[in-house]
Image (spheres, grey):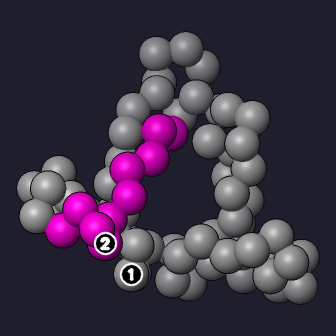
């Protein structure tokens, strides 16, 4: 979907979305992601915490993880 790409900011500690001002204040503990483009890179997240997990963890716990293409 063209035109649907945008950036989101997340806490690296909790995996929750944070504001741009939080990202500026705590840049070492936040990450900015490009979403909506349906890219070719695949990431895995815990559905309960929102934190990134490894591919092995995603395979072992498919009902509690989600895979995103970014």
Please identify the quarter of the rendering in which residue 17 is found.
Answer: bottom left
Residue at which label 2 appears: 29
- Pick the quarter of the image with the C terminus: top right
- Secondary element at tag 1: loop
Q: Look at the image and tell me in which quarter the N terminus lies.
A: top right
Q: Is residue 31 magenta?
A: yes
Say whether residue 8 is left or right of residue 5: left
Which of the pair 30/63 is nearer the observer?
A: 30
Nearest to N terminus: mark 1 or mark 2: 1
Q: Is 62 in front, or is 27?
A: 27
On screen, residue 2 versus residue 64, left or right, reads left
Q: Position of residue 7 (x, y in %)?
A: 37, 39
Label annotation for residue 13: 1
Label disc, if present, on residue 24 of the rendered structure? none
- In magenta, the rendered stretch is 26-35
Q: Position of residue 24 (x, y in %)?
A: 14, 56
> SS at mark 2?
helix
The image position of residue 41, as x and y in percent, is 72, 42
Whether pointer 1 and pointer 2 mark residues with C-beta atoms closer than 8 Å, the reply is: yes
| Residue 13 sits inside the magenta stretch | no
> What distance separates the C-alpha of mark 1 from that of mark 2?
7 Å
Identify whether 27 is placed above or below 33.
below
């Amino acid at each position: 979907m063209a035109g649907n790409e945008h950036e989101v900011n997340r806490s690296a500690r909790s995996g929750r979305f944070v504001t741009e001002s939080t990202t500026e204040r705590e840049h070492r503990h936040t990450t900015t992601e490009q979403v909506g483009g349906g890219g070719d890179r695949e990431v895995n997240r815990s559905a309960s915490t929102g934190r990134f997990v490894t591919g092995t963890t995603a395979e072992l716990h498919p009902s509690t993880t989600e895979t995103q293409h970014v």
